[in-house]
Amino acid sequence: MNQIQPRSEQLDLNLLKVFEAVYRERNLSLAAQALFLTPSAVSHALARLRRQFDDPLFVRDGRRMSPTAACQRLAPPLLDTLARLRELLSHRDRFDPAASRQGFRIGLPEATESVLLPALMQALRAQAPGATLASVALPRRDLGRELAAGQVDLAVDVALPVRDPVRHRPLFQDGFCVVLRAGHALARRLSLKQYLQAQHVAVSARATGQVIEDLALLNLGHQRSIALRCRSYHAACAVAAQSDALLTLPESVAARIAPESGLARVKLPFALPAAQVHLYWHANREGDPANAWLRGLVETVCGRATGG
């Protein structure tokens, strides 16, 4: 049984519309009328289709164009695909979360991930149960490139020096506090002197370089002693819970992790400006209804998760 195998060159979508019209009308003149083309244009398009598929496709039977056996096999899936394509294009400016099967990717730092993902996943299941979500690590230097390439739909991170076509808006502010094991001698009150004399756990995705609290201390003319540097706040909390080391971390993270880790929270004994957390997306997704819906969902979830 012969199978139609289209040639490797790109197939013109307009040729498929001609195929559809001829298959349905079984007459070149009627197909031309349906397409608002001349019979000659339809005839030339049919000749190109025949070369493309290496099959006559239709044979003349009086005034009627009868499909070949191979054409009969090709027509049902092809017409169904065209119908689906038209449906997709007709809904390009609409997005139905309840019917969506779309996969979304958001760039999230580890600290923000632990705060937002539980609530974000709960909201996604309620509004778009067929959609999926992936949280990915996104180096800040790659933010614009990854958004432009569509590798991520959105990103959530601290305020960064970005410019158009990367768009952004503030989500929330996140202050800092100190956590330490329950029963620690400093659990009730912590002075700056005691903070500087203690051992500390520092959290950073980078292998070297100052973290934000150390930069603030240096501006005050102080320096602390870091006993451990790690990449995860969960790991850092586990260390603090089993040692005398202090851990400075965002309040939103402390609120979620500290209670389950058996840690006490105390006020940071020096001024450290709150982190400004922003939502980022690319200008080429500004008008995409799915992206706009996702941006709104993240904003709503951030407001609930951070109490703002």
Image: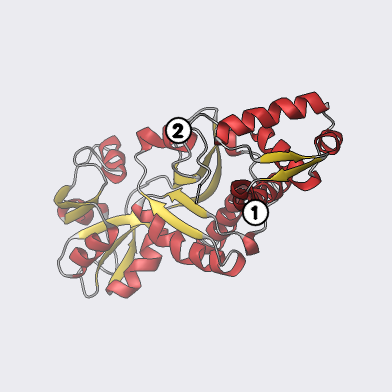
Residue 154, position in %: x, y? 50, 45
At x 28% / y 58%, what residue is drawn?
233
Q: Which residue is mark 2?
A: 144
Q: Which residue is mark 1?
A: 76
Residue type at mark 1: give it: Pro
Q: Quadrant of residue 212?
A: top left
Q: Is residue 56 visible?
A: yes
Side (left or right) of 281 relative to 35: left
Q: Quadrant of residue 46?
A: top right
Residue type at mark 2: give it: Gly
At x 43% / y 47%, what residue is drawn?
274
Reply above or below: 175 against 188: above
Q: Quadrant of residue 59?
A: top right
Residue 276, position in %: x, y? 47, 45
As rendered, which of 113 and 7 lies closer to the eye?
7
Reply above or below: 228 against 144: below
Residue 121, position in %: x, y? 49, 65
